[in-house]
């Protein structure tokens, strides 16, 4: 939807469009007065019916509402369904959502080192179904200069942020200027997940695995000394924090709500999709290009643990499902898909092609060598896709372990902010 060109009399056309009877009355009165003047003073005017064709001018320029453009920024480091839900809410407040991805330098100055590179974070943000435009290397603070750029260059109407405070190192509000000029709107924060929480889960779940074999117990704090992901979440989470509470409404909000057409080419891909990253986005994009409808199977927590190791998954089934549903290339998901793709499953979902990437994490200790794709292979509908990126859940975890002290410090600082937020938390309507 685009705006249209106006002449210098916008108010006249607006009036004609919204109050046609009123302006029609004015024109009729003017015409009658013109006739009266002609009768009494002898001044010649055109006969009234001559004017009727000209009245069509008032219908030629139909008023088109200018699209509301909203802006929301963030670090979007370790992208999770909370980020996706925030952007979904932001999009609902306007017609076009412009997203600013904060620069690495500003993240380091205000929060600590980012886990993901700018390129990876851009892939994740651009892959979300609610995002229309992206601004790379956005500043952490909405400065006067950047705000002017937003309003003039990007035609932003409102700046959006969650109800949790975003403070600069000096304690001031990063969105103070936008609030001051009345161009700020607030959305509800998604409870139960944060990048800080995920870093804690990673440190916990990876404690006794290969990636931390050189880290002694003295290095890793007591609350993180566990290999069970569920226990890790319980120990690292704040007692005042609400854990993830999946609802059917949230799934509906993320879902496209449409099935494949009768003759659609349905492509199926499955996996854990744990700690949703740029590699996932790229492989899903490649898979979607092969058909008309992309169906994604998401394995259960138990299946992931059996085939990838007891320390995984880091994110639970419903959390992983929401992250995948938020991807613009995904049409539908199977929550808790079976490990083996059977002929019955292929028939049930009318699957035309089953694909799998070349990059996958498997438990080297697993003795089961049964091929989960034997059925689609025998039917001639299986295809291996070259994974565009070699990033994996474990490789992301290794980045954190490699900078353990920096992330421990970052988490400790953030946890204090989280505690203050929850201590003063009040109900915010909408989600």
Image (cartoon, helix red, strand yellow):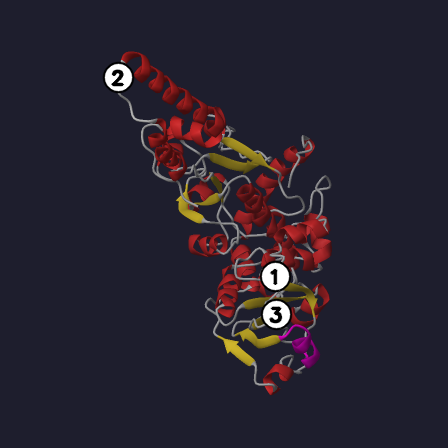
Image coordinates for residue 11, horizontal then vertical, percent: 39, 26
Task: Determine which residue is flagged by label 3.
Answer: 270
Determine whether 192 is above or below 349 in the image: above
SS at badge 3:
strand
Measured in 3D between alpha carbons, the distance from the residue under mark 1 to the one under mark 2, in whole angstroms, is 85 Å
Q: Which residues are magenta?
A: 341-350
Image coordinates for residue 167, horizontal then vertical, percent: 52, 33
SS at badge 2:
loop
Q: Residues within 10 Å of mark 2 (few under 14, many from 20)?
A: few
Task: Determine which residue is flagged by label 2.
Answer: 43
Instruction: Give the number of the mark in front: 3 or 2.
Output: 2
Query: In percent of the image, x 51 and y 48: which residue is there?
Result: 76
User: Can residue 219 be seen at all in this image of the molecule?
Assistant: no
Is mark 3 in CB contact (under 8 Å) with mark 2? no
Residue situated in front as seen by the camera: 420 or 270: 270
Task: Determine which residue is flagged by label 1.
Answer: 274
- Numbered mark located on residue 83 in the image: none
Extreme top residue here? Answer: 41
Instruction: Give the number of the mark in front: 1 or 2.
Output: 2
In the picture, measured across the screen, residue 350 lies left or right of residue 160, that is right
Question: Mark 3 or mark 2: which comes first in sequence?
Answer: 2
Question: Mark 1 or mark 2: which comes first in sequence?
Answer: 2
Image coordinates for residue 103, horizontal then vertical, percent: 42, 45
Residue situated in front as seen by the camera: 149 or 116: 149
Which image quadrant is residue 311 in? bottom right
Image coordinates for residue 399, horizontal then vertical, percent: 51, 57
């Amino acid at each position: 939807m685009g705006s249209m060109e106006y002449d210098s009399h916008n108010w006249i056309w607006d009036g004609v469009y919204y109050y046609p009877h009123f302006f029609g009355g004015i024109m009729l009165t003017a015409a009658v007065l013109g006739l009266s003047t002609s009768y009494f003073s002898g001044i010649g005017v055109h006969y009234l019916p001559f004017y009727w064709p000209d009245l069509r001018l008032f219908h030629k320029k139909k008023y088109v509402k200018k699209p509301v453009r909203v802006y929301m920024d963030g670090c979007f480091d370790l992208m999770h369904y909370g980020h996706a839900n925030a952007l979904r809410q932001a999009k609902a407040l306007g017609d076009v959502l412009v997203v600013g991805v904060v620069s690495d330098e500003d993240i380091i100055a205000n929060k600590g080192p980012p886990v993901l590179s700018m390129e990876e974070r851009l892939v994740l943000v651009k892959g979300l179904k609610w995002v229309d435009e992206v601004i790379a290397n956005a500043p952490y603070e909405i400065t006067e200069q950047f705000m002017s750029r937003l309003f003039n260059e990007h035609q932003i109407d409102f700046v959006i942020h969650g109800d949790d405070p975003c403070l600069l190192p000096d304690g001031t509000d990063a969105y103070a200027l936008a609030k001051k000029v009345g161009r700020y709107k607030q959305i509800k924060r998604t409870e139960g997940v944060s990048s800080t929480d995920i870093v804690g889960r990673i440190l916990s779940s990876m404690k006794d695995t290969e990636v931390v074999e050189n880290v002694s117990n003295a290095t890793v704090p007591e609350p993180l000394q566990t290999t069970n992901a569920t226990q890790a979440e319980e120990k690292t989470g704040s007692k005042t924090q609400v854990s993830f509470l999946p609802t059917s409404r949230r799934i509906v909000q993320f879902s496209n709500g449409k099935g494949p057409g009768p003759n659609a080419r349905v492509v199926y891909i499955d996996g854990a999709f744990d700690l949703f990253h740029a590699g996932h986005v790229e492989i899903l994009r490649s898979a979607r290009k092969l058909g008309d409808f992309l169906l994604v199977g998401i394995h259960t927590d138990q299946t992931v643990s059996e085939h990838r190791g007891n320390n995984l998954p880091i994110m639970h089934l419903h959390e992983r499902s929401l992250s995948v549903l938020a991807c613009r290339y995904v049409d539908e998901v199977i929550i808790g898909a079976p490990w083996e793709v059977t002929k019955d499953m292929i028939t049930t979902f009318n699957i035309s092609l089953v694909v799998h990437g070349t990059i996958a994490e498997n438990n080297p200790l697993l003795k089961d060598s049964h091929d989960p794709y034997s059925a689609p292979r025998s039917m001639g509908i299986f295809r291996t896709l070259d994974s565009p990126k070699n990033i994996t859940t474990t490789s992301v975890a290794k980045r954190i372990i490699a900078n353990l002290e920096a992330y421990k410090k970052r988490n400790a600082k953030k946890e204090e902010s989280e505690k203050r937020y929850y201590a003063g938390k009040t109900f915010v309507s909408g989600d």
